[in-house]
Image (cartoon, rainbow, N blue to C red):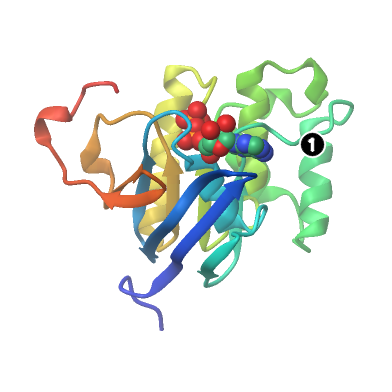
Amino acid sequence: MTTRTETALQARDVHKAYGRHRVLRGADLTVRRGELVAVVGENGSGKSTLLKALAGIQPPDRGEVRVHGRLGYCPQEPVLSPSLTAEQHLRYFAAAYRLPGTERGLELLRELGGERYLRTSVGEMSGGTRQKVNLALALLHDPDVLLLDEPYQGFDWETYLHFWDLVQTLRDRGRAIVVITHLVFEQERFDQLAELVDGRIRPRAHHPEDDHVRA
Ligand SMILES: Nc1ncnc2c1ncn2[C@@H]1O[C@H](COP(=O)(O)OP(=O)(O)OP(=O)(O)O)[C@@H](O)[C@H]1O
């Protein structure tokens, strides 16, 4: 039996440098099941670097990352094959995850309004549609911990709202979700605001006056 207080992801004292550029300098983050966390910070503060470290794409130079359960990572730039269709991507990823079929992927694409592009090759898709496929693939295996790097880029307004509904549903089902976002409005959506400053996470208090204001 699992409860919401269970830790789903824990990062301790994470350091990462590119050459002499020390981007992460002791970042700590704890996310529990059923928690939605926003990672915010200035351009270049290291948000994507942190997510890559959490996802294991770019292991930290120092520090520790623990993920409890299955991980899903949606990178900022879609990693898709231009010559394959959305349907083919779903099939290949479903096989890689050993899923019985592509139903969940189809459902996700439907929710995001990308279903009509199932037989379109990725190379012929718009950026927003590519991002829908990217997100559906990251969610395909129903991960316990979801790391999303500005996943709504290129989404039209309606898809953007559907995206947050989807995130809310996953959160309510106990998934732990970390989203990089430049938006500081609607802060009440989030259980934690984690601000990256000088390579460390600084918990940010909720300021109601910031709501409905873009960064
Ligand atoms: N592969 C790399 N090699 C060298 N430097 C890098 C690399 N990736 C990122 N950087 C640098 O590390 C710093 C942090 O980059 P990162 O992409 O993590 O920031 P970010 O907060 O996600 O930025 P943004 O808000 O613009 O997306 C930047 O100065 C960037 O130029």
Determine the image quadrant of residue 184.
Answer: top left
From the image, tell me which residue sits under label 1. Answer: 87
| Residue 206 located left or right of residue 184 | left
Residue 78 image point, x, y percent? 69, 33
The quadrant of the image that shows the N terminus is: bottom left
Q: Nearer the viewer, residue 11 or 169?
A: 11
Residue 120 in view, yes or no: no
The quadrant of the image that shows the C terminus is: top left
Q: Nearer the viewer, residue 26 or 118?
A: 26
Residue at 51%, 49% in the rendered image = 50
| Residue 8 located left or right of residue 20 | left
Q: Residue furthest left?
A: 209
Residue 141 in view, yes or no: yes
Q: Is residue 71 above or below residue 191?
A: below
Residue 11 image point, x, y percent? 46, 65
Question: Label 1 amino acid?
Answer: Glu
User: How many labels were placed on the picture?
Assistant: 1
Residue at 58%, 55% in the rendered image = 53
Determine the image quadrant of residue 185.
Answer: top left
Residue 138 image point, x, y percent? 63, 47
Determine the image quadrant of residue 35.
Answer: bottom left
Residue at 81%, 46% in the rendered image = 91
Q: Secondary structure at mark 1?
A: helix
Q: Is mark 1 within 8 Å of ligand 1?
A: no
Residue 56 image point, x, y percent? 64, 59
| Residue 99 located left or right of residue 183 | right
Residue at 44%, 26% in the rendered image = 160
Q: Nearer the viewer, residue 29 or 160?
A: 29
Q: Is residue 213 above or below residue 58?
A: above
